[in-house]
Image (spheres, grey):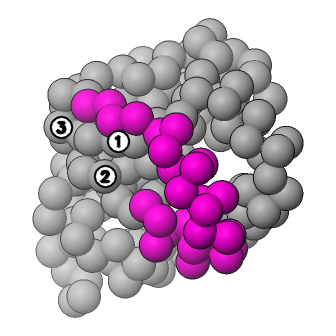
Amino acid sequence: MKKFLSEIHPVDESILDEYIAHWVAYDAPKKTIMTAPGQTEKHWYYVLEGIQKSYYLHEGKQHIIAFTYTPSFSGIPESILTQTPSKYFLETITDSKFLRIRYEKHLQLMEEHRQIETLFRKATEFFLIGMLQRYYELMAYDIETRFKAFAKRSPHLLRVLSQKDIASYLRIDSTNFSKLKNSVRI
């Protein structure tokens, strides 16, 4: 985790050590709903092992927003940043191990240490840039180009995620996804 955070923004080692000391281990078996609509996210999570998905339900169908896996943060960003109820789910796809910090402690440490605040501002900027890139891909790319971009960015997920989940994330009909996967050379 220290290396991951340091790559986002350099922080004095003593401050970073103090910050990391407040993160505690948390395990969740596969298919655990960590956050549901109406619940307010109380922790930032850092993924040590496993894969999670965030999704909306609309007319009984899952619409996947994101996958998280090591090394990355996980949680419902809008809910934790604003301390308002989530509008969607966070669920573990596989058994997962995390480090997590309570929102109140995270906020206190950001207020005490400008470097931690800067670190999370930059992490939020990277998150926003990634979401805008995903939005662009969904709006501008055809299904084959979306699939190729996903395969290039996250090839390991093709081996561990269900076709249904990947198709939902890429906004491709499951039948078309199966044909696409078999016809496109990666």
Question: What segment is highlighted magenta in the picture?
Answer: 1-27
Given residues 37 and 165, the one toward you in this image is 37
Give x and y (percent) for residue 50: 24, 48
For label 3, the residue is 95
User: At x 33% / y 35%, what residue is drawn?
Assistant: 25
Pointer 2 or 1: first along the chain: 2
Callout 1: helix, strand or loop? strand
Residue 48 circle label: 2
Give x and y (percent) for residue 186: 24, 88
User: At x 47% / y 65%, what residue is drawn?
Assistant: 2
Pointer 2 or 3: first along the chain: 2
Task: Decide whether residue 22 is among the magenta residues.
Answer: yes
**CA neighbours of label 1 inside 10 A, class few (<14), some (14 to 19), many (20+):** many
Q: Quadrant of the N terminus?
A: bottom left
Task: Decide whether residue 92 is among the magenta residues.
Answer: no
| Callout 2 touching callout 1 (CB < 8 Å) | yes
Callout 3: helix, strand or loop? loop
Horizontally, residue 87 falls left or right of residue 125, namely: left
Given residues 88 and 61, the one toward you in this image is 88
Image height check: is 49 above or below 131? above
